Amino acid sequence: MGASTASGGEVVTRFAPSPTGFLHIGGARTALFNYLYAKHMGGKFLLRIEDTDRARSTDPAIEAILDGMTWLGLDWDGDVVYQFARAERHAEVAQALLDRGAAYRCYATAEELEAMRAEQRAAKQPMRYDGRWRDRTPGPDQEGKPFVVRLRAEQEGETTIQDRVQGPVTVKNAELDDMVLLRSDGTPTYMLAVVVDDHDMGVTHVIRGDDHLNNAFRQMGIIRAMGWEEPVYAHIPLIHGADGAKLSKRHGALGVDAYRDELGMLPEAVNNYLLRLGWGHGDDEFITRDQAIGWFDLDGVGRAPARFDMKKLESLNGHYLRDADDARLADLVAAKIGSAISPERPDSAPELLRRAMPFLKVRAKSINEIAEGASFLFRTRPLDVDEGAAKLLDDGARQLLARARDALAAVGDWSAGALEAAIREVAEEAQIGLGKVAQPLRAALTGRTTSPGIFDVLVLLGREESLARLSDQIDLAAEH
Ligand code: GLU
């Protein structure tokens, strides 16, 4: 597609969340698509917080949005625009529309409008404002009375939007009533504010969820009345759950912060997953940020609702964990298990985790799983042994452990190879398989039945701690 807008200028996109809740996964995808399209076109990506709904907008929600965007690396250009701060400008445009006869004052009271709707309901007509003040001039009766400002919407013909995702979409103008632009308290409606802000911010491409498609026709009415340039619209299908129903909490419609904190995901995994949710580049599964910027285009956005699949996201996350720098993961895991780290060895934690990371991350799908897998490193002696591990530590096993401890104590070079050789010898002497020795060893060293390879565990724990943990279990047997 062309490299710029109809007028040949720079592409400007924006993400315009309402801070009435956290940055959820659908919003994050909208932000990502806007970001990528702007970068792909060498343009700008702007952020506007639509906080005009004072009752429902909250500061924590604003913080969560900014925080989530930063975590995902969706850096916006320039300062954040706060919509509420622009209310005067919105009122100014409403006045300009009044001045040019494209809008009018409507003095209908709430009761009158309710009666109008009741009649429409009874007559089974569509409920919409009937234009009763469209051609009326306010008289002395209206002096000092509250009014709203309504758009004098085009009633003839139809409006077509060439949507970059939905294709051409046409609506009969008669279906759009004269919407309110300014409320009786002088505050702007969402419809007016969005159009004015997009215009003033120079937005050329409006990329957003297709739940806003109907609004686009109304917004177009304002744009045309002002004689402003129409943006390119791209309404992307909403995300559905794996079962095809609208995405809900149950499906993973959580805040982005939950993906980070509760689910232990890496931002690159979430980005990669969201990118492929409704957009694709052949069969490519793993797509870096740079590749995404190089390849992303609106033409590749599908028209069918994408289905959210947590399993896929988890396996992507596993891929990115294996790719990730071990020191970075060590810091993330240390932050997660902070309080579990033994006060006796607090300084060693990040270093120990970094050394352990190659073994810990092999099969993990989340930071949480790595943290769980790493916990053996930080348990304090004597270990609490879980039920499964306790079963492996019967008297026979403890005798075996005593032999293993002696063999290990005699090893001069505490390396995985030397340790394995020593344990193999113990197994051979006892005429049992290596696994039969490894199982109680694991139980005694970690207190669990699963862990990284047992020789890696020994190396990570070190000579002193390993032998002490073994002795704890052996001595326990002696006490019986
Ligand atoms: N503030 C609107 C929302 O959060 C988006 C408006 C728009 O993108 O035009 O749904």
Image: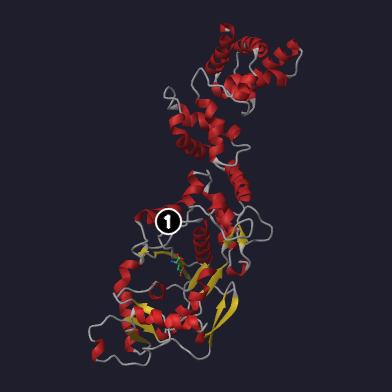
Nearer to the camera, 45 or 277: 277
Q: Is residue 382 above or below residue 378?
A: above
- The residue lying furthest to the right in this view is 431
Q: Position of residue 219 (x, y in %)?
A: 45, 78
Specify whether 84 is left or right of 25.
Answer: left
> Residue 325: in sight, yes or no?
no
Q: How many marks?
A: 1
- Residue visible at 60% across and 46% down? 314
Colour scheme shown: secondary structure
Q: Quadrant of residue 272?
A: bottom right
Circle 1 residues within 10 Å: few <14, some 14–19, many ≥20? many
Residues 313 and 14: in front is 313
Find residue 404 and report its horizontal and vertical position in percent: 65, 13
Q: Quadrant of residue 434?
A: top right
Image location of residue 10, percent across then percent down: 47, 72
Q: Position of residue 43 (x, y in %)?
A: 48, 67
Local SS, label 1: helix
Quarter occupied by the N terminus: bottom right
Query: Residue at horizontal 51%, vertical 28%?
Result: 352
Q: Amino acid at mark 1?
A: Ile
Q: Quadrant of the C terminus?
A: top right
Closest to the observer: 306 or 408? 306
Q: Which residue is tagged 1? A: 65
Front residue of 13/217: it is 217
